[in-house]
Image (spheres, rainbow, N blue to C red):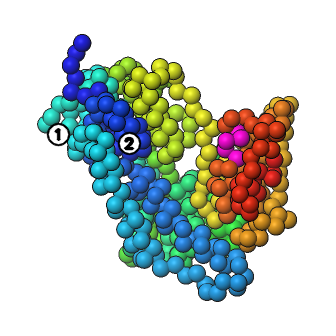
Amino acid sequence: MTAYDYDVVYIGSGHGTFDGAMPLAAKGKRVAVIEADKVGGTCPNWGCNAKILLDAPVALQHTLRASNGIVSGDGKIDWAKNKAHKQAAIDVIPDALTSGMEGSGITMYYGAGSLVDAHTVKVNDEQLTAENIVLATGLRPRKLDVDGTELTHDSKDFMDLDEMPKELVIVGGGYIGVEFATMANAADANVTLVLHGDQALRGFHQPYVEQVLADLEARGVKILRNQEVKGFAEVDGGVEVALSDATLSADWVLDATGRQANVEDLGLENLGIQASDKGIEVNEYLQTAVPSIYASGDVIDKEQPKLTPTAQFESQYLMHRFAGESDAAIDYPVIATNVFTTPRIAQAGVTVEAAQADPDTYTIQENDHNGNWYRAVDYEQDAKITLIFNQDKQLVGATEISERAEDTINALLPAIEFGYTPEQLERLVYIFPAIAFDAMTQL
């Protein structure tokens, strides 16, 4: 048997790595992790953790203002303090993760890793050999290919702003575009949201999306639809944004038009591993065209949502495979997803659109929360949930718009994933009053 330096070498240290690498090392496997930037990758440093810290005062402001004077004050957000609080909270994460990985027996290497052959990785001037290699290099923001694109900024730049610009243009209607429009508006920026097509958040139930957009407009956000960006130009210290139907002036422009996989400079082409800006192609075992080389997390070209929990699941799946505990193909569970606007939209399982297309299989039930006493606790207005049932009356999908939609969908997720029957649901006795109890009364 060939003697390798390690059992597994991971390139990248985000959720696609550490959620599985640490327990794998704790089981006695020899594990190395290579990181070219901050340990932990995008999510804790420039993504989910940072975003939710910046968003928390926004949600609080929304609730305060909805209280109609029960809580006094206007909820004005000090963005500089908000950013400083965010930074203080996340600055400890890389060292904490490093300590956790080293404490579990993982060897850390710092630099850009690349493939030499099926069992060898180069980092700096050193070559490491491993029985298996995992590529977990994630995504990065994509830039519009137009003149002046260097004048725009990305999501990482936005979350590092010490002061909120007065005139802000956001290009893109995905998670980042709509969520950051919500934050910037709450921090008193004049926001214009530019959509390439007629819809935003295309993966979500559009009537609920339109409700979110209408709320943003009511709070002063300008939304321009069906616009092609022609280019950007520096004018009088600001940025001029040329669109197909308008020209905008901005102090600062956020390009939120998408993200692309970090697949360059990994040596993939030399080994015949197929990849594009959508990610690396893998089989049902997360293997690339080279059986000893795997991929995990957002860098995979896949149908499943590219979210932190997905990467965590994949990393743990690989842990079990490398530990010799399972040789089964990956079996993805129901993956819930959420957009952190105010109000939020969250969903899991069969979508409303899929259910509408197959009425013989599914029954759709929409409940309006306006008459629900518990929603008055958070001063809810116009909250709704749509539930999808199969012919056996099992819950197979749900989507909600509300201030706490993520909590509702999390409460319903076990019923969707495990196919609870009405009789089994009756045996779930939740804390009352609580959002989970309220969610279960909808079934």
What residue is drawn where x is 59% and y is 59%?
Answer: 340
What residue is drawn where x is 29% and y is 34%?
Answer: 31
The part of the image, by quadrant, that contains residue 276 is top left
> x%, y% of residue 220?
63, 74
Q: Can you say whether 116 is above or below 231 in the image?
A: above
The part of the image, by quadrant, that contains residue 122 is top left
Q: Nearer the viewer, residue 226 or 71?
A: 71
Considering the whole magenta stretch, tell me its main secondary structure.
helix
What residue is drawn where x is 33% and y is 48%?
Answer: 100
> x%, y% of residue 362?
82, 35
- Tell me the mark number nearer the camera, choosing from 1 and 2: 2
Q: Which residues are magenta?
A: 412-416
Q: Can you say whether 342 is above or below 20 in the image?
A: below
Q: Are the residues flagged by discs 1 and 2 in contact, CB closer than 8 Å?
A: no
Whether residue 414 appears in magenta in the rendering, the answer is: yes
Res 89 visible: yes
SS type, badge 1: loop
In the picture, measured across the screen, residue 377 lies left or right of residue 272, that is right
**Residue to which mark 1 is pinned:** 124
Could you tell me the amino acid type at mark 2? Phe
Q: Can you say whether 190 is above or below 180 in the image?
A: below
Could you tell me the amino acid type at mark 1? Asn
**In the image, farthest residue toward the left:** 125
Q: Can you say whether 340 is above or below 250 in the image?
A: above
The part of the image, by quadrant, that contains residue 325 is top left
**Residue to which mark 2 is pinned:** 18
Classify mark 1: residues with Cα within 10 Å, few (<14), some (14-19) or many (20+): few
> x%, y% of residue 197?
63, 51
* 3D distance between C-alphas at marks 1 and 2: 21 Å
Whether residue 14 appears in magenta in the rendering, the answer is: no
